[in-house]
Image: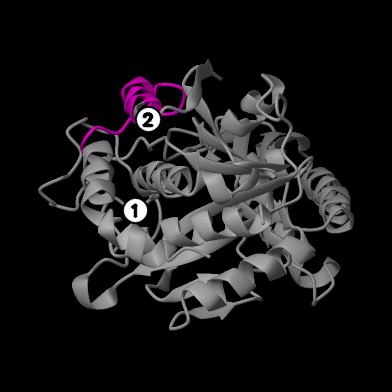
Amino acid sequence: MPDFVKEAEDLFEYTQALRRDFHMHPELGFQEFRTAGIVAKELNALGLEVSTGIAETGVVALIEGGKPGPVVLCRFDMDALPITEETGQDYASQNNGVMHACGHDGHTAIGLTVAKLLHNHRADLAGTVKLVFQPAEEGLGGAERMVKEGVLENPRPDYSLSLHLWNEKPLGQLGITPGPAMAAAESFDIHITGKGAHGAAPHQGLDPVLAAAHIITALQSIVSRNVHPLEAAVVSVTAIESGTAYNVIPPHASLKGTIRSYLPEVRELVHRRFAEVVSGVATSLGCEATWNIFDMTPAVINDEGLAVRVRHVAESLLPHDSVDTTYRTMGAEDMAYMMQDIPGCYFFVGSANHEEGLDYGHHHPKFDFDERVMPKAAALMAAAAADFLK
């Protein structure tokens, strides 16, 4: 196996310059035209076969190995978030109200570094690496759209790999978990209809605000009292809207929120109890309720055998880093759409540095990460892909 760590460290200035440029010029989902243009330019400079415009701004490139073999897909997301940056860094966003607050700027720079690393060793690869730079991961359906537009064909991958720089873990820690790694995500809305009245005469109305409050409380019983204690789920109400006056009971109330789960049977249980709770509580207080649950992404389920292989690569490549094989998060990732058809491994690379204040959570306006993680991440992705193509 080549010394991918040293080679990635030698490319650090290249990786860092790309990452900071992407960070200064963030673009929202399906609007990553500048980012995609740089990605295509860098890949073309390597002489790769490059396809652009997939799902608006997606870019795909192939690295053909020197010998026949399987196809490994390596995916990197490119989009930013509608957040106003507060880091104060000299490379802070120049696009007001848009920020790379989740590390996708690093992912894109890492992907281009992986392209260089694997291209340099293409003669030793037995198969093909399919590099996928994806738009619109942040809840806009970029992966699903790329799949619909044929990203998993011509050639069809046999394996898939993806990573996330992860500020929930410090630099020097990895999360490589067989089985469920990230949750299926759904959003919901609830509309409650009561009867408006004067706030001083509540007996003349049917209070949807009271019903909403009871529904919020009762929904928490699903996880605490219906889901098996050794399984996992989340039901969070995150928005409430009702009324405009101090002294008027309004006729309507609305709730919004999210549901997260790993297993299909847990998801089905949560959906059944959700309907029973919302309907039953609203009815008991004289109101009517309607609701909708919207799919966002399936769960990210790592192939157990491939996760073990990536762990072995990591332990050999980064012997001083610790590997957590039980780490899971209720966060969601649309890489799940690609992994539904292609067995793969999605892993986390710790990127936080508490001493330097680089430990704010993802989607925080002060989010940033320790850039020393990028050579580690690039080396591990390149080495895992090369291992799959032995």
* Residue 324 coordinates in the image, percent (x, y): 58, 78
Q: Amino acid at mark 2?
A: Val
Q: Which residue is mark 1?
A: 364
Q: Nearer the viewer, residue 264 or 177?
A: 177
Q: Quadrant of residue 74?
A: top right
Residue that appears at 35% across and 35% down:
82
Q: Nearer the viewer, residue 323 or 196?
A: 323
Query: What element does badge 1 sit on?
Result: loop
Q: In the rendered structure, find residue 39 and report the number of the disc placed on it.
A: 2
Q: Quadrant of residue 148?
A: top right
Q: Is residue 246 left or right of residue 370?
A: right
**Label 2 crowding class (10 Å Cα cut-off): few <14, some 14-19, many 20+?**
many
Q: Is residue 195 left or right of residue 138?
A: right
Q: In the rendered structure, find residue 187 and report the number of the disc placed on it.
A: none
Q: Please identify the dominant SS of the magenta region.
A: helix
From the viewer's perspective, is residue 156 above or below residue 70?
Answer: above
* Residue 229 coordinates in the image, percent (x, y): 80, 76
From the viewer's perspective, is residue 119 above or below residue 30?
Answer: below
